[in-house]
Structure formats: C-alpha cells, structure tokens
Image: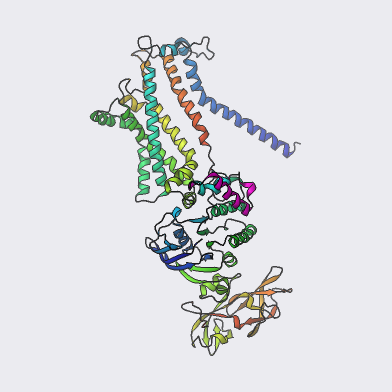
C-alpha cells in the first residue's frame, strides 16, 4: 500500500505540472499573435495567405521595412512623420494626464470636500461611454473650433480620455501612504509642498508609473478617434498610418505587419524602462507591521 | 527648551465640541501626561499644539511666542507618532537626519547630530537599515532619535508605546524616562494607559469629554482624586465603588449593609445624601495582609468568590454592599474559593463622592 505522504507528494508534483502547462497555454495565447505579426512582416504575401498556414517560413527578408522607408511612390509611407506625431501626442498627453491625475488623486485621497463622492463617480462614469460614440460630436466640435488635424486636438482628446483613470489609480496609491508620514515631514520642517515631493511622491511612484504607462499606451495605440480627427501627415499617428496599406481591393498584410512592429518596439522599450519603478511594497515599514 | 501654555483652547468639528476651553501651563522641562479614555480630546489637543489641527479659539504659547497660526515646521517641536511614521524609503540615518537636511545644515553637522542621538538610543548598528528591516521596538527608538535630532522646544508623544508588546513597553517606558532625565526637555505625552502616565509624568492631566477632570502630580491624582471619574481611571486594579445613602452616621448600601461614616467626612455630608464610596483594593484585605497599618479599621467576615494569585500578592474578589470588591492580599497565604475570612476595611482611606456631581466630598 502506498503511504499517505508519498501519494500527497505525487499529487503536489502533478498539480505543479498541470499549473505549468496551463501557464504555457495562456502565455502562448497572449504571445502568438505578436510573434505572428513579427513573422508576417518578414515573409512574402503568398506565404502569409497560404492555406493551410505555413508555420515555418521558407524565406525571410526585410523587404517590407526597406519599402516602408523608401518614400512615397516606391511603396513607402511617411512613417517618420507618423512616428513623430505619435511621439509628440502620446508623450504630451501622458505628461498632462499624469500631472492632472496626481493633483486630482492626491486631492481625493487626502482632502474632504463637498460632493467628493459625486465627483468621483462622475469621473468614473465618463469611462462608461464608448470612445467611438463621441467621435461624431467631437468631430463637429473640432471642425467648428478649427482643431481638426492638429496635435493639440488629439492631445486634448487623449488627456480627457486618460485623466479619470489616472486620478482613480493614483488616488489608490496615495491612500496607501499613511497620512502620518506627511505630518511627520511637516513637523520635521517641510512645507506641505516639500512633504509631498520628498515623502509622499516617492512612495506613490509605482502607482504614478503604472498610470503613466497606461496613459501612454492608450494614446499610442488609439485608432478610432485618431482616424476621425486627423487628415494628413500634420497629425496622423501610427495606428492611422496602418490604413495606408489598405487599397480599394487589396490589403498589404506584410507592410501592415512591418509598421505594427515599428509601433510595438517603442512601447515595449518604454514599458521595460518604467518597469523598475513599479516595485511596490515601498510603503511597508512606515508604520507598525 | 521652553514652557508651553494653553489658554482657553477650543476645538469644534462642526457641531461636535472636541476640546472645551482648555487651560494648561507646562513648565520648562516638565513632563506632562494627558490621559483619558478614547474620544476625550487628548490627541486633538496634542495635534493642536503640533499645528496639525487648526484651533477654533484660544491661544497656544511656546515660550512667549503665540503659535496659534504657525505651520508645524515653524513651532520648533518634535513629535513621536503612535505609528512611528518613519519614512520607508529612507535609511535610519536619513530618517534621523531629515529634519536637519531640510533646514539646510552642513553634512558634517548632520552626521554628528545623528551619531549622537544614535549612541544615546543604542541604535548605531541600525543606521544603514530601512524601517521595514526593523522590529517594533527598534522603530520606536528610531522615531525617538528623529525627535531628538531636531533639538526642539517641546517634545510631543502621541501614544508612542501602544503598538508594542507588554514587555517591550515596560522597557521603552524606562528608556523614555531616562531620556527625559538626561535631556531635561519639556514633554507632553498622550496616553490612554494610566500606568504609563503614573510612571513617566511629573504631572498628570486627566481629561474627559474635552475638559480637564483633574491635573496634579501622580501622588495627588492617586491619593486625592477630585472626581469619581479620576478615582476610577487611575490605579490598577481600579478603585472599588459602591453606591449608598447617608443615614444616622452610617453609609447604607443598596443591599442594606452599612459602614460607619468615616470621621473625615462627618461635616461634609448631610443625612439622606446619595454618595459613592470608593476604596482602593489596597485598603480592604484579610486581617494581617494589608499594605498600611490601618488607622480606623472596620472588620467584616466576607466570602472569597474568586482568587487571582500573582506571586507576591493575590487579588481576592468578594461581595459587599451589593457590588463586587477587589482586595489585594500581600504576603499571600493559600485561600480557596468559598472560604469566609475576616476582612479589614481601612475607613481612614475611604473616598466619598457626591452621588449627583461625582465630585469628591473631601473638605481638607
């Protein structure tokens, strides 16, 4: 007869294996599309469209990338303009959304004021409206104001989109910073402002970094509004640029995938760079525990 | 160092009156403990002194400077928080030196000040750790170190020991007392633990419902409580209390039992007056096991309902006058539940409080 210890040990090992397999499948589902995009950007359209799919590519080349940068007429698109627009719009809107989010989040976490919960729910409710539903009214409004096809117009839209979320996220992180710390800092000689920057801000940094990544990626990847509110290389962003690869009857899947890779790389680099600020648990040890 | 004055200090939160016209003077170098049950206004008072809470009316003076509307940083005070409130992203060294760094002092001076405080508190080996790597007692020391480095006019302590276990609390209590003896600083110490207040303070201020119930030396508040509330709050185990009525020179209790009216109260009461009799557990004891010799002793046979042996003494619980009394038996002998023993009640040490107002009826 197998003793209970041994069977329990075997069961534990099996559970671990099952978990690993489940994790592998989940990761495959998440990563395969990305991999597929990278792969498709490197091989001829025949292979992309083949049925059944060709898993192992027979030929890889960088033709799509070369073509992309070859300029209009040689199969290229104004990718540098799009890239510049995307960077300017995503970065500026993120910085503004973070500044507003920090001020708002701090206020919600620390102060009591009239209609506080009403304001908060109101902010959250704005998130329930699908962005696309706003595109037509926004289009009319922007057309009237003359800010169609400008950086300013898109930045404004993205700030409005991101601020409720950044406020909500940063509010949660400031709540975790004990109030005693700011009071101790004020007694130690800080003004309120110094207490915020020297004590509360460093402790809420993981939350602010998360909010920043989120806001940046939202703006970087947004398509629906951008496709309505932009016209030309003045303000077209990379996601809108993807449309340049569609013609009336054909879609250049390879070129589109190549541009997608160009889009993914900066986002990936940024996330990687900010990741080290995401270590949380810094607040532990402030008070008893 | 400086003295501290509170004049008609008042705090209202909307319709809630938290502190009601407090008057208190703390001498330069004096250690004053504010005690009272939760919600009595003691912490609010401390936070008003610190500048963390606005005052509704009245004055706060540190030295001869009115600080009513000054920011905390302008008051030259230090505060030790119940939660310690150490900055988690800084090392112990940075935590302690923070105040001088903000003040823009030179590195060398900060280094010396931190080293001195660390030596005094025996936390030198911890200087490069972060708060998360410290035990509760160590964090407590660091918090005190941070307060010392600031070299303030007044030290404020907000229940600094209540997050520690009993043994550590005892140790830190001694530590704080030693520190005060060395620095000679002015201290306002808030606690709900009357033992802390008794052991540490030069003067104890007992608060209730935003008012001062009594302020006096530990000896005064223990031996001459001004009100029934103070009598019940100070002392451990708490004072025994029994309701009664004055009748024919006797105090008659609810169950018909009587005790002679102690001589010291004979002129202070009138027949038919409702009173509360208070007696410390030290003043009712089995014959031969008392703390004091006993000047006017009344002897009663009483049945022991329960015993709590503590080694050097045993607490006995007996019923008398319709309530349960605690008795402290020194040099204990073996007593069993249900045994009936002769108990002595020291009438010279009885406290009498007015049944209505709760104020002490002691005249002298």
As drawn, is B124 to the left or to the right of B54?
right
| Residue A198 placement (x, y as % from top left) | 47, 43
The total of numbered circles placed on residues is 0
The residue lying toward the viewer, choosing from B32 and A179, is B32
The residue lying toward the viewer, choosing from A154 and B356, is A154
As drawn, is B313 to the left or to the right of B259?
right
| Residue A134 placement (x, y as % from top left) | 31, 32
Q: Main secondary structure of the magenta part?
A: helix
Tell me which residue sits at (51%, 26%) in the image.
Answer: A30
Quarter-wise, where is residue B90 in the image? top right
The residue lying toward the viewer, choosing from B326 and B125, is B125
| Picture layout, residue B125 above or below residue B308 | above
* Residue B83 in view: no
| Residue A13 placement (x, y as % from top left) | 67, 33
Magenta-span inclusion, residue B351:
no
| Residue A2 placement (x, y as % from top left) | 75, 36
| Picture layout, residue A20 above or below residue A164 | above
Q: Which residues are magenta?
A: B102-131
Taking the view exactly as shown, the residue that stands out farthest to the left is A144
Instruction: Classify the position of the N terminus of chain A by image quarter.
Output: top right
| Picture layout, residue B342 above or below residue A81 | below
């Amino acid at each position: 007869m197998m003793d209970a210890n041994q069977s329990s040990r075997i069961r534990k090992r099996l559970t671990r294996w099952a978990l690993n397999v489940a994790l592998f499948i989940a990761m495959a589902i998440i990563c395969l599309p990305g991999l597929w995009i990278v792969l498709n950007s490197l091989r001829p359209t025949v292979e992309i469209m083949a049925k059944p799919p060709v898993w192992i590519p027979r030929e890889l080349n960088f033709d799509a990338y070369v073509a992309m940068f070859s300029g209009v007429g040689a199969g290229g698109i104004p990718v540098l303009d799009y890239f510049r627009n995307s960077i300017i719009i995503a970065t500026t809107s993120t910085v503004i959304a973070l500044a507003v989010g920090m001020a708002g989040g701090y206020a919600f976490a620390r102060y009591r004021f009239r209609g506080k919960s009403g304001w908060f729910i109101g902010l959250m409710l704005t998130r329930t409206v699908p962005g696309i539903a706003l595109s037509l009214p926004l289009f009319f409004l922007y057309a009237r104001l003359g800010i169609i096809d400008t950086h300013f117009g898109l930045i404004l839209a993205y700030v409005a989109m991101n601020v409720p979320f950044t406020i909500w996220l940063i509010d949660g992180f400031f709540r975790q910073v004990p109030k005693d710390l700011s009071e101790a800092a004020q007694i130690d000689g800080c003004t309120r402002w110094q207490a915020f920057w020297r004590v509360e801000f460093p402790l809420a940094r993981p939350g602010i970094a998360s909010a920043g990544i989120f806001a940046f990626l939202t703006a970087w990847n947004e398509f629906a509004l951008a496709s309505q509110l932009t016209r030309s290389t003045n303000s077209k962003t990379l996601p809108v640029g993807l449309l340049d690869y569609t013609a009336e009857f054909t879609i250049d899947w390879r070129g589109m995938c190549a541009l997608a890779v160009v889009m993914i790389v900066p986002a990936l680099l940024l996330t990687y760079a900010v990741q080290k600020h995401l270590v949380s648990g810094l607040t532990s040890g402030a008070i008893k525990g | 160092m400086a003295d501290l004055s509170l004049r008609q200090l008042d705090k209202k939160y909307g319709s809630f009156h938290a502190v009601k016209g407090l008057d208190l003077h703390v001498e330069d170098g004096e250690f004053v403990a504010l005690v009272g049950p939760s919600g009595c206004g003691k912490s609010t008072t401390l936070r008003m002194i610190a500048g963390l809470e606005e005052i509704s009316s009245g004055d706060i003076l540190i030295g001869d400077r009115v600080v009513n509307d000054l920011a905390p940083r302008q008051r030259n005070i230090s505060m030790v928080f119940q939660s310690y409130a150490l900055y988690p992203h800084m090392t112990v060294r940075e935590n302690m030196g923070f105040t001088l760094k903000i003040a823009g002092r030179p590195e060398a001076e900060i280094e010396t000040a931190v080293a001195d405080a660390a030596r005094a508190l025996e936390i030198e080996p911890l200087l490069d750790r972060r708060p998360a790597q410290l035990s509760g007692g160590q964090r407590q020391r660091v918090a005190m170190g941070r307060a010392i480095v600031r070299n303030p006019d007044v030290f404020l302590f907000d229940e600094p020991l209540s997050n520690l276990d009993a043994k550590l609390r005892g140790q830190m209590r001694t530590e704080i007392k030693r520190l005060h003896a060395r620095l000679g600083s002015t201290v306002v110490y808030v606690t709900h633990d009357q033992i802390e207040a008794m052991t540490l303070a030069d003067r104890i201020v007992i608060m209730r419902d935003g008012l001062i119930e009594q302020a006096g030396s530990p000896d005064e508040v223990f031996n001459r409580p001004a009100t029934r509330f103070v009598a019940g709050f100070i002392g451990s185990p708490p004072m025994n209390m029994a309701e009664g009525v004055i009748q024919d020179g006797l105090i008659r209790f609810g169950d018909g039992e009587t005790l002679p009216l102690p001589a010291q109260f004979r002129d202070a009461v009138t027949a038919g007056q409702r009173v509360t009799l208070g007696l410390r557990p030290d003043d009712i004891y089995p014959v031969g096991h008392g703390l004091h010799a006993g000047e006017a002793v009344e002897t009663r046979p009483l049945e022991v309902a329960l015993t709590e042996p503590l080694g050097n003494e045993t607490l006995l619980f007996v019923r008398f006058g319709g309530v349960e009394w605690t008795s402290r038996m020194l040099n204990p002998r073996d007593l069993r539940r249900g045994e009936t023993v002769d108990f002595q009640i020291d009438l010279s040490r009885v406290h009498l409080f007015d049944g209505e107002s709760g104020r002490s009826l002691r005249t002298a």
